[in-house]
Every structure is written in C-alpha cells, then in structure tokens.
Image (cartoon, grey):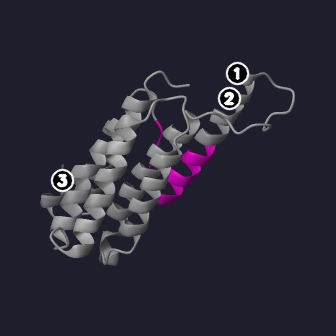
Amino acid sequence: MCQNATKTAATLMAAIEPTLKALLTFTGLINTPQGIAAMNAYNAALVALQNWQSGTAAQTVLELIAAFQSVFNVLPIPAELATLVNIILAGVETVIGVLTANSPAPVGVAGDATEEETQAMYQAHVVADTTAKVTALVPTFKRSIWHSPASQYTKAWNDAVIGGKFSTALAV
C-alpha cells in the first residue's frame, strides 16, 4: 500500500477545488442551487477523505465521491468546456483509484496467494483500471512517477486552459 495514500488522495482532491470553483464561476453556476449543491457535495467528500485511513475500507468516502459525481454530472455546463469537465472527472477517478487500491482487497480474489500477494495483485488491477479510465477522459494524460498526482492534475488543467484558448480566468 502507498505509505502516503491519504495525503496523496486528499492533496489531489484539494487540487480539484480551485478548478471546480473556476469552472462554476466561469459558467455562472457558482451561486446557483446547482453550483452550491456541487460544492457542498465536493466538500463532504473532501472532509471524509481527509479523515480516511489508508488500509481501511473507504466505502463511506467512495459513496460521498459518487454523490459529488452525480451532482457534477448534471450541471448545465456548455459542451465547449467538455475538456475541462473531463479533467475534473479524471482527477476524481484518480482519487477513487488511490482509495480503492489502498483499501483491503476483496476476499478470495487471488485463490492460494498470500495476503500480501493478493493485495499487490489487487493494487495492480486497480492502477491499470484507473489509468484506462483517466486516459479515456483525458487522452493526452501520461502517468508520471516523478510528479505528484496533484501537480499532474493542475498542469493538465492549465495546459488545457491555455492550449484550448479558454479564458485565463480558468487558470489556477
């Protein structure tokens, strides 16, 4: 398991906040009931994540993240901002991947393997699955072991804002 899974996931989730606020502000949704609901759902997920301990089940945190995704996915965000929406969703998928990979592996997934082998196989599967989901949302994403997920997320966001010629008000 990742020694700093809680910190890694919480730091990435926290990096999503300014991009979420920038997107909601830019679209005029920040002070609407939908925007407020999205921010409240995001904040609930962040607080739960910050209280989660690596190696324990993350079910409550995952449920709160799913609630945020549900609220976020129905926001009336213009199609031309889909690239930025996908970056936020990819960041959330990465948080889910970190949580899942650092929760106990489901019982019986590896037959005769030891507990450590089972956890390692489970983590490898979760990493591959998460990478595939993130790449589907952000095809230009390249995983790096040299940079934190939060810094990779912020770079992807700012590159998309600048490269997509979106308003610099969206840069973080």
Instruction: Please tell me whether residue 13 is drawn above or below residue 2 in the rendered image.
Output: below
- Disc 2: which residue: 119
Find out whether the residues at labels 1 and 2 contact each other: C-beta distance under 8 Å. yes
Instruction: Please tell me whether residue 59 is drawn above or below residue 75 in the rendered image.
Output: above
Q: Position of residue 41 (x, y in %)?
A: 33, 59
Disc 1 on helix, strand or loop?
Answer: helix
What residue is shown at x 43% (from left), y 24% (from top)? 4
Inspect this view and state whether residue 52 appears: yes
Q: Position of residue 1 (x, y in %)?
A: 56, 25
Q: Classify residue 105 as left or right of residue 25.
A: right
What residue is shown at x 68% (from left), y 29% (from top)? 119
Q: Earlier in the sequence, mark 3 or mark 2?
A: 2
- Badge 2 amino acid: Gln
Q: CA distance from mark 3 to mark 2?
A: 38 Å
Front position among marks 3 and 1: 1
Question: Could you classify mark 1 by the number of other residues whose Cα lies within 10 Å: few (under 14), some (14-19), or many (20 or more)?
Answer: few
Q: Name the outermost residue toward the right.
A: 112
Disc 3 on helix, strand or loop?
Answer: loop
The foreground one among 4 and 61 is 61
The foreground one among 18 and 106 is 106
- Disc 1: which residue: 116
- Badge 3 amino acid: Ala
What residue is shown at x 38% (from left), y 60% (from top)? 68
Q: CA distance from mark 3 to mark 1?
A: 42 Å
Magenta-drawn segment: 128-143
- Disc 3: which residue: 171
